């Protein structure tokens, strides 16, 4: 069985499901770029650490690059899991940071390639917390005129994800091509 080039693993939010509208939209984007996508179901787990454990225990299909994508609580889960999984990139939508009831207020990511999409009108996560988090970890930050669900700006989120994923996919390919050219 050959390895897929890029595997995108989605982590849904606390009150959504594994194939909600955002994840379906972004999985379509990933598919058009040739990436495989999986989206585990966490609806039976309300504790963020239990969700992290489930993500870390998943039997991933063989792949060359891993990209983690998380929304709300799934953003928190993706950040914490990224420290062990070491993905090529981390794409977060309104990540649940700086909230009571989470083991870490501001978990450090396990990648330098971090991109965050946030709504200015988010009623769950304080936009100021996300701005500070993005500054602390030198993340690319996109603040959109949206609420926590980002539903009204899904086409914009999809385009941001497309650019992010295209860059993550091509970064390694360019270094491989460069190495091959230098051996000629």
Image (cartoon, grey):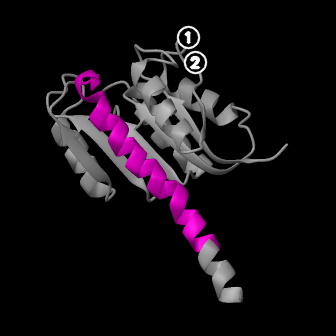
Q: Is residue 17 above or below residue 11?
A: above
Residue 114 - label: none
Task: Please state the extent of the stretch shown in magenta in the rendering.
Answer: 148-176
Quadrant in which the N terminus is drawn: top right
Q: Position of residue 17 (x, y in %)?
A: 48, 15
Q: Residue at label 1?
A: 44
Q: Residue at label 2?
A: 41
Horizontal side of 12 relative to 64 (left or right) equals left
Q: Position of residue 99 (x, y in %)?
A: 30, 29
Residue 152 part of the magenta segment: yes
Q: Position of residue 151 (x, y in %)?
A: 28, 22
Label 1, label 2: how many angstroms apart (C-alpha)?
8 Å
Q: Main secondary structure of the magenta part?
A: helix
**Secondary structure beneath label 1:** loop
Q: Give the camera-side residue of 22 and 135.
A: 22
Q: Residues within 10 Å of mark 1 (few under 14, many from 20)?
A: few
- x 59%, y 44%: residue: 34
Residue 164 part of the magenta segment: yes
Quadrant in which the C terminus is drawn: bottom right
């Amino acid at each position: 069985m050959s390895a897929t080039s890029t595997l995108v693993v989605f982590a849904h939010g606390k009150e959504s499901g594994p194939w909600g509208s955002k994840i379906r939209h972004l999985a379509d984007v990933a598919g058009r770029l040739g990436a495989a996508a999986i989206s585990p179901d966490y609806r039976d787990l309300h504790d963020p650490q239990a969700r992290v454990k489930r993500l870390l225990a998943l039997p991933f299909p063989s792949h060359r690059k891993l990209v983690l994508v998380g929304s709300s609580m799934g953003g928190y889960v993706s950040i914490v899991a990224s420290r062990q999984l070491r993905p090529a990139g981390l794409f977060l939508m309104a990540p649940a940071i700086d909230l009571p009831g989470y083991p870490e207020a501001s978990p450090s990511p396990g990648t330098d390639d971090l991109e965050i999409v946030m709504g200015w009108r988010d009623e769950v996560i304080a936009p100021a917390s996300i701005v500070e988090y993005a500054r602390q970890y030198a993340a690319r930050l996109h603040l959109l005129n949206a609420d926590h669900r980002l539903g009204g700006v899904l086409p914009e989120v999809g385009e941001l994800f497309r650019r992010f994923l295209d860059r993550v996919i091509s970064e390694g390919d360019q270094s491989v091509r460069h190495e091959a050219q230098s051996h000629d």
